[in-house]
Image (tube, grey):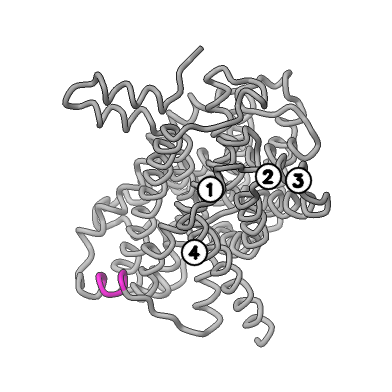
């Protein structure tokens, strides 16, 4: 039977020599790192770009604020899955009223499908920067490629390839050091929150929270932790139950690494666009060329190429995760066989959900909505949808009947409830402000 990544990591520390700890750390990376990389999907890039362009450095403080919260929530989701051997929707089905299950899964499916639509549209718009084919031609091609890869290609091999494309996001990190001028102001705004009680500021704050602490990440993290156990030969629910302290230790290292990577990219995009676009008076990003301009200081005429690579690469990574997390939830709700480790013939319902949500995402783009603006409003929708799902996660993770001795410890509990309450307040404040327009 294959040994777990945690056991491989511990073995490297014992026998790996001077580089043992480094090798152990690299072996432990998995679901957390992929989840963190997918968090900087086209919706995230669009939202962070709009933040820097519209508000300059004023919302840089959201990075150090959201990092521990997103890491805390993802750790809780991973711990739930590792200990119970079950996904979030399955646990809601078994332990909570059916209306709560249907409500949560419906919210997830709606938010994810809209997000898929926004990502596909942005990928098509970015593709036009490379080759001037019509938007619809790019949209059809990208939707077909995404759906085909999701359903017929082994996801783990597919993700390894796509991570190379997402490395283009590091261009934003480089631009920070080329274009940023006022490091004193950058440091101040990063470390000291500034709150403005107006509709635009609240709308953007909810968008940041929604694209950073996104509902699809909760279900995806849990699903991938289970698939890791299945890879180890633990194919039955009973065999998957239980988690060791060693497994929890390396899971946390994986989750924190993934969320740290995501946060670094988030901060870099906001700082870059503030230093390049905001200072030039470009405060509204409504097209792919405008968004790509932020990379011109280091890429010059290749800015469009680099931006397109980032959007298409992160989109091809994120769309399967968006569709997959919805498929996990719906399959668990209706007791369908599920898992990306299965072939199409083994789980037709699971892959049918993936195809269906991708096709609806495609159809959303036929409404004529601006694909770049759609990224931003998708993030806002995620911010409004997340609180009830977070509440359910906190109830599960604090339920001793479900979690036994692996219920939330004080720090995890505090982080989880701060996230839930904070996102709820932000969403309610936004809805109230919209009502007073």
Q: Which residue is mark 3?
A: 95
Up-down: is 262 above or below 369? above
Q: Is residue 189 magenta?
A: yes
Instruction: Count residues near mark 4 (Cα–Cα under 10 Å), then give few for <14, some for 14-19, many for 20+.
Output: many
- Label 4: state its secondary structure: helix
Q: Which residue is mark 2?
A: 401
Residues shaded magenta: 186-191
| Residue 208 marker | 4
Q: Is there CB contact under 8 Å for labels 2 and 4?
A: no
Say which of 93 and 306 sits in front.
Answer: 93
Image position of 37 (left or right of 19)? right
Q: Which residue is mark 1?
A: 76
Q: Is residue 54 magenta?
A: no
Q: Horizontal and vertical percent for residue 47?
A: 48, 62
Q: CA distance from mark 3 to mark 4?
A: 32 Å
Instruction: Count residues near mark 1 (Cα–Cα under 10 Å), then give few for <14, some for 14-19, many for 20+.
Output: many
Q: CA distance from mark 3 to mark 2?
A: 9 Å
Q: CA distance from mark 1 to mark 4?
A: 21 Å
């Amino acid at each position: 039977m294959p040994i777990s990544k945690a056991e491989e990591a511990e073995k490297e520390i014992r026998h790996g020599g001077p580089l043992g700890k480094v090798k152990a750390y690299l072996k432990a990376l998995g679901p957390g790192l992929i989840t963190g990389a997918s968090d900087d999907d086209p919706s995230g890039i669009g939202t962070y770009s709009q933040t820097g362009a519209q508000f300059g450095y004023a919302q840089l403080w959201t990075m150090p604020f959201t990092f521990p919260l997103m890491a805390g929530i993802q750790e809780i989701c991973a711990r739930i899955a590792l200990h119970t051997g079950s996904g979030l929707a399955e646990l809601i089905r078994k332990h909570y009223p059916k209306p709560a299950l249907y409500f949560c899964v419906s919210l997830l499916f709606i938010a994810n499908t809209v997000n898929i639509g926004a990502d596909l549209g942005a990928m098509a718009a970015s593709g036009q920067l490379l080759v001037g084919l019509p938007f619809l031609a790019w949209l059809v091609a990208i939707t077909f490629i995404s759906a085909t890869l999701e359903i017929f290609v082994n996801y783990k091999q597919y993700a390894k390839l796509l991570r190379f494309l997402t490395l283009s996001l590091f261009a934003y990190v480089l631009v920070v050091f080329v274009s940023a001028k006022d490091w004193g102001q950058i440091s101040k705004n990063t470390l000291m929150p500034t709150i403005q009680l107006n509709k635009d500021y609240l709308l953007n704050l909810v968008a940041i929270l929604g694209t950073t602490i996104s509902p699809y990440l909760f279900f995806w993290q849990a699903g991938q932790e289970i698939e890791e156990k299945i890879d180890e030969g633990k194919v039955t629910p009973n065999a998957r139950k239980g988690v060791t302290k060693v497994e929890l230790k390396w899971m946390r290292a994986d989750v924190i690494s993934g969320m740290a990577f995501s946060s670094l990219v988030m901060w870099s995009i906001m700082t870059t666009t503030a230093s390049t676009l905001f200072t030039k008076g470009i405060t509204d990003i409504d097209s792919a060329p405008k968004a790509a301009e932020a990379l011109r200081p280091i890429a010059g005429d290749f800015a469009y190429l680099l931006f397109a690579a980032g959007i298409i690469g992160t989109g091809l990574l994120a769309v399967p995760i968006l569709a997959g997390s919805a498929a996990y939830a719906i399959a668990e709700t209706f007791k369908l066989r599920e898992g990306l480790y299965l072939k199409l013939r083994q789980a037709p319902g699971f892959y049918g959900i993936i195809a269906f949500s991708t096709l609806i995402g495609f159809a959303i783009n036929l409404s004529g909505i601006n694909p770049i603006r759609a990224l931003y409003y998708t993030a806002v929708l995620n911010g409004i949808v997340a609180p009830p799902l977070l509440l359910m996660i906190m109830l599960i993770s604090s339920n001793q009947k479900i979690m036994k001795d692996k219920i939330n410890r004080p720090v995890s509990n505090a982080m989880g409830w701060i996230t839930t309450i904070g996102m709820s307040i932000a969403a309610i404040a936004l809805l109230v402000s919209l009502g007073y327009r």
